Amino acid sequence: GELSPEEVERTIRELAALASRDGWPTLQAVREGNVYAMNGSWYFSRPGPRLVDGLEALALFLNSSRSQPQNSVGVKLNVNLLAKLPRV
């Protein structure tokens, strides 16, 4: 499903906190622009079929040579925009 406005706001705050951590810019995935976001609560918090869906999506992200894996349940983040988020 779609994210509520509150979930979007929380995600932006959490991304800002993550991007402001020491060492963030030196991570290989960040340097190469391969940072993805998924709904962790939906795919990884509880055992069940969604866990398998989440793992399949991670496999697509890790093995895809495309900028965005087809049929993806996540989104590729623009790391340049993340660097401009207000520090938390």
Image: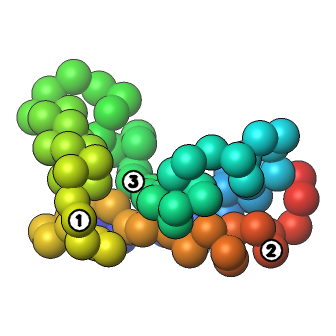
Judge the density around disc 3: few (<14), some (14-19), many (≥20) Cα neighbours within 10 Å. Answer: some
Quadrant in which the N terminus appears: bottom left
Q: Where is residue 46 drawn, in percent x and y?
A: 29, 26
Q: Which residue is mark 1?
A: 65
Residue in view at x 59 percent, y 56 percent: 30
Residue at the spot 69% in from the left edge and 68% down from the top edge: 82
Q: Residue type at mark 1?
A: Ser
Tell me the element at label 3. loop
Q: Say if residue 11 shows up in the picture.
A: no
> Would you say the residues marked 1 and 3 are in contact, meaning their CB atoms lie under 8 Å apart?
no
The CA span between labels 1 and 2 is: 27 Å
Mark 1, other Cα within 10 Å: few <14 / some 14–19 / many ≥20:
few
Label 2, secondary structure: give it. loop
Lateral position of residue 28 relative to residue 25, left or right: left
Instruction: Answer left or right for 3 relative to 47.
Output: right
Q: From the viewer's perspective, is 25 left or right of 62?
A: right
Q: Earlier in the sequence, mark 1 or mark 2?
A: 1
Residue drawn at x 76%, y 68% as measured from the top left: 83
Circle nearer the N terminus (1, 3): 3
**Nearest-to-viewer mark from 1 and 2:** 1
Residue carrying label 3: 38
Q: Is residue 2 visible?
A: yes
Q: What secondary structure is marked by label 1?
A: loop
Instruction: State the image coordinates of residue 11 (x, y, percent, origin top left).
Output: 61, 58
Crowd band around label 2 with a 10 angstrom C-alpha radius: few (<14), some (14–19), many (20+): few
Q: Amino acid at mark 2?
A: Lys
Mark 3 and mark 2 lie on one chain; the one further toward the N terminus is: 3
Would you say 53 lies left or right of 77 here? left
